[in-house]
Amino acid sequence: MMFEEFSNTISTGKHDRSFLQVLDMNAIGKSSKAGLVKTKGYLISLYGFDIEDPVFDQLLKLWEMTSDEERRLMAILFAIRNDRLLRSSIDYVIPYPLGQKVEIDGLMKHLSKVVSYTENTLRSTAQNIASSWKQAGFIEGKVRKIRVEPVITHIPVAFAIYLGIQEGLSGEFLLESPYIRALGLSVQKLSQLLYEASIRDYINYQSSGNVVTISLGEKMKSHGK
């Protein structure tokens, strides 16, 4: 998900929202023009930097009030919105047992059900995807990529709900969205963070029996549907 490059672009361009200009000026510090063009293309495909996009606008708003760990989680959720292979990898990475090595060969096999790449391209793609999950805090280790559990707060959960609402989901379907699934939370922990997000007015959340009601709170409503 190229978090460092994305974060640097946001930090440099946020005062006037000149993100594309910031990329053109090589604020991400690439050593060659070819490297800059390639990286810029990847970043735009993942994040768009469209200031008219309400989801990107919401991300910028939350960016100002969050920690580095929370930003990493929001970044991968945003990238999942735009990258179908990263979205597909949720079903491989998230169920992986904590403490076990995440096998790249297994991820390659999983991705091969979605795309018809050569083995070299598939391996490179799988390694990049594993790197994205590592940057977000779900994997650690340079050689042995071990599945770990990041610390997740109510703000990434609220952003995941927002993304689901933007895609037209409601009620319990929001809790089954790829964005919520990507956080890998237990039912109990998810419920706790939903209530916390509700108390802090990011969302409105009620659950009674099999009926779940979720809407945007005042802190996010002006940027949502």
Image (spheres, rainbow, N blue to C red):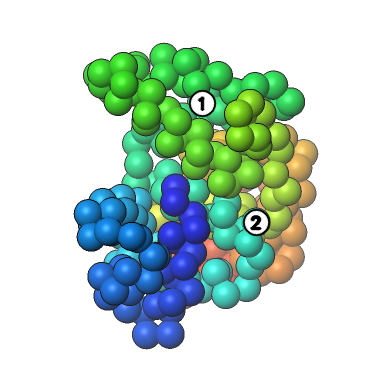
**Side of 94 relative to 189 (left or right):** left
Q: Foreground residue, 3 or 37?
A: 37
Amino acid type, residue under disc 1 in the picture: Asp
Q: Which residue has dot 2 on it?
A: 69
The image quarter containing residue 204 is bottom right
Sooner in the amino-acid sequence: mark 1 or mark 2: 2
Q: Is residue 55 left or right of residue 221?
A: left
Quadrant of the image occupied by residue 55: bottom left
Left-right relation of 168 to 206: left
Q: Quadrant of residue 66?
A: bottom right
Q: Position of residue 208 (x, y in %)?
A: 71, 44
Q: Dot 1 corresponds to which residue?
A: 91
**Point 55% across, 69% down: residue:** 62
Q: Nearer the viewer, mark 1 or mark 2?
A: 2
What secondary structure is marked by label 1?
A: helix
Residue 11 screen position, x and y as percent: 48, 74
Query: Measured from the top left, where is residue 20 in percent x and y?
Result: 28, 70
